[in-house]
Amino acid sequence: MDRLNPTGQASAAELAAWDHRHLWHPFTQQDEWEADGPPLIIERASGVTLIDVHGRSYLDGIASLWTNVHGHSHPRLIAAVQDQLQQVAHSTLLGCANRPSITLAHRLVEVVACIPGDSPPLTRVFYSDSGSTAVEVALKMALQAQQQWGQIRRTRFAALSQAYHGDTVGSVSVGGIDLFHGIYRPLLFDAVRVPAPDRADPVQEAACLAEAEALFAAHGPTLAALIVEPRVQGAAGMRMHSATYLRRLHQLCQNEGVLFIADEVATGFGRTGALFAMESVGLRPDLLCLAKGLSGGLLPLAATLATEGVFDAFRGPPGSQRTFFHGHTFTGNALGCAAALASLDLFEDEAVLAGLPPKIAALTDALAGLPDAWVAERRQLGLMAAVPLRHDRGPEARIGHRICMAARDHGVLLRPLGDSLVFMPPLAMAPAQIRQLGEAAAAAMIEVLGGS
Ligand SMILES: *Cc1c(COP(=O)(O)O)cnc(C)c1O
């Protein structure tokens, strides 16, 4: 049996060996993982820097998979979680309530009121643990609400082409990325696939909308809801569309009695430059999914927000079948909610949104500095960016992956989406550090692809 070394902790070499022997990494071809040698093992973090077991530092260029907002180990976030830990770490929302989950629900309803629009506001908060579950919850709520309104034919969903809404079976069903989703087809329900443009180009969007109209004309009465990632389809490689495109889709939904679900798991909490991407669209969804940045990136926490109208569809006498039959064991976890409350405080106290413009400009500079020869396109909204690469070596050459591996030698942690380089710094990253991400990526591109 392996024993811990005299300091009481496994050595870096032991950890690396145990990782290869026992850990199964998400979205990872383990053959490649093992061939890449000892893994990067993060031990601690400070601000926007991750530090590995050898004491080497890396700028967190992907905000620890798009979650981190205020930097790691922020003293106020640590204090909030520690305080809550002293009180109670977890108690159930089934049959009772707890202080932080109530307070956060109240607070979230307040903050989402920044999304303007004529339709009713979001007033109800249902917690879960991940973006995927926030989406599952929204889908089940939409379907059940329609049924309980007597709209019994409305059992299907519309979703955008190239959508990504998570990895559970329902959220994969509305997903549209075949590389991730194709193999699971036999498990999935069928969604009406509305074409989405790859950029906010009026000609492309007009063609997509014409098709959307035809799809709604054909399937409208059978649709419970449309789900979208507003403004930016993140996992698809930051495919973007205009606010106008979304307003037109929303109009189609309203005309046809179809609920509109905004999945802001990636775009929420300042990512696009505003607190929510829907602010720029100027309309309120019927259901809103939040996760990733909700807890500031500290703890797994998600929320699905609903209007009072949707909520009312579930009211009925005790014992009626109108109850929303869903709930995860850790729903409304007190530590997660305490972290989220402290994160929302920081947004205000540190004027985070007001500080974004120079950071967004620094990201634009960083992308501009990448060698043109290898850049197919530069896609950016706020502090979300992706750069699809142009080369002729094919996907099996794993160029995106190799560039991100090379960037580590320049002190930067990146993770690509296929052959797109992704830049998603924590909102707390300073402009100079954001430029450093670009410089590291540029150097790595030249090392892997050549040129100068
Ligand atoms: C990441 C993501 C999800 C899934 O969130 P998990 O917490 O990984 O389950 C859902 N929707 C969007 C838009 C995302 O970016």
Image (cartoon, rainbow, N blue to C red):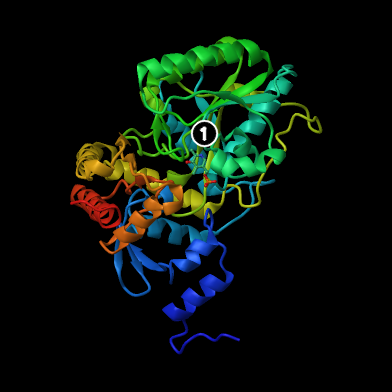
Residue 212 in sight from this viewpoint: yes
**Residue neighbourhood size for the residue with mark 1, other residues' Cα within 10 Å, grouped as few (<14), some (14–19), many (≥20):** many
Above/below status of 238 relative to 81: above
Above/below status of 381 relative to 425: above
Quarter holding the N terminus is: bottom right
Dot 1: element: loop
**Residue 104, horizontal then vertical, whole percent:** 48, 42
Q: Nearer the viewer, residue 451 or 256?
A: 451
Position of residue 424 in the picture relative to residue 361 (left or right): right
Q: Residue at x 50, y 55 (%)?
A: 335
**Residue 49, horizontal then vertical, whole percent:** 30, 60
Above/below status of 157 relative to 298: above
Q: Which of 186 and 81 is in front in this view?
A: 186
Name the residue that disc number 1 marks. Answer: 163
Position of residue 234 in the picture relative to residue 102 (left or right): left
Q: Which residue is drawn at 36% across and 39% down?
A: 271
Position of residue 309 in the picture relative to residue 346 (left or right): right
Q: Which of 221 and 319 is in front in this view?
A: 221
| Quarter assignment of residue 386 | top left
Residue closest to the far front: 392
**Residue 148, horizontal then vertical, whole percent:** 73, 22
